[in-house]
Amino acid sequence: MLLAIDIGNSQIDLGLFRGKRLIKSSFFPKEDWRKFPLKKFIGEKKVSRVFIASVVPSLTGKIALSCRRNLSLKPEIIKAKDCGIPIKIKNPKEVGVDRVLNALAAFSVYRKPAIIVDAGTATTLDLVSEKGAYLGGIILPGLRISAEALAEKTALLPKIPIKRPKTLMGKGTISAIQSGIIYGSAEAIAGLIRKIKKDYRKKLLVIGTGGWIETLAPLIKSIDKIEPYLTLKGLALLYHKDTKAQRK
């Protein structure tokens, strides 16, 4: 059984896999890493390997050490180059491992060229070719970053809860900010999807993932599929491939 760990900028996602099948998942805020709930999450299940994908280098070693202490297993730190797909950008080392794992999982599941919308701390749109290659992407501020920037850089605008307002036109400062951030982000994503489709000139499947995708997806009609555990599934695919190779 695999323990898959995705260390993101805002939260840490956990997944237990039997082969390619996700049997349990959880997440917790990145700031709570000292309370890393490893034993509670795993329970009585037998874990044979641990795969970690991280975009927060300062936490990678700490989480890996917790795994060694609690499971007596040495975690395998997965890099973008380990994912086994062509990365067609100028400097492949620049792309986050989570984005390449998303590309791997999306193509492995659907076998189609795709746009992956990952609505997390940052919102990314990544393009996967009809042969499964990672072709590049777009990065824009996520919902939380946008809200925090307004609160920090203005004198009178408050911090707000991120939720969809009842009406498009705000009836107060808070709902006006919520509308601008949520509807504005949704329109930006929808517009970028249209632009990518026009430039790429091939039929593209649009897959949504990330912590904020459930908030945004109802406002973006061009999203075809929702895959909340895409990065974890990418780790599970690597585990499955490696396990099969070892059996041969």
Image (spheres, grey):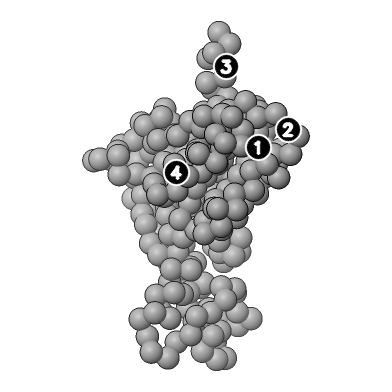
Check disc 2 and give the amino acid type.
Answer: Lys
Mark 2 or 3, which is nearer the eye?
A: 2
Task: Return the mark for residue 60.
Answer: 4
Residue 66 location (% of width, % of height): 55, 41
Task: Return the mark for residue 16.
Answer: 1
- Comes first in the chain, label 1 or label 4: 1
Q: Does the CB distance between marks 2 and 3 fall below 8 Å?
A: no
- Comes first in the chain, label 3 or label 4: 4
Q: CA distance from mark 4 to mark 2?
A: 23 Å
Residue 9 location (% of width, % of height): 45, 55
Residue found at the very far front of the displayed protein: 69
- Comes first in the chain, label 3 or label 1: 1
Q: Quadrant of the N terminus?
A: top right
Which structural element holds mark 3? helix
Q: Does the CB distance between marks 1 and 2 fall below 8 Å?
A: yes
- Comes first in the chain, label 2 or label 3: 2
Task: Return the mark for residue 45.
Answer: 2
Q: Does the CB distance between marks 4 and 2 fall below 8 Å?
A: no
Check disc 4 and give the amino acid type.
Answer: Thr
Q: CA distance from mark 1 to mark 2?
A: 9 Å
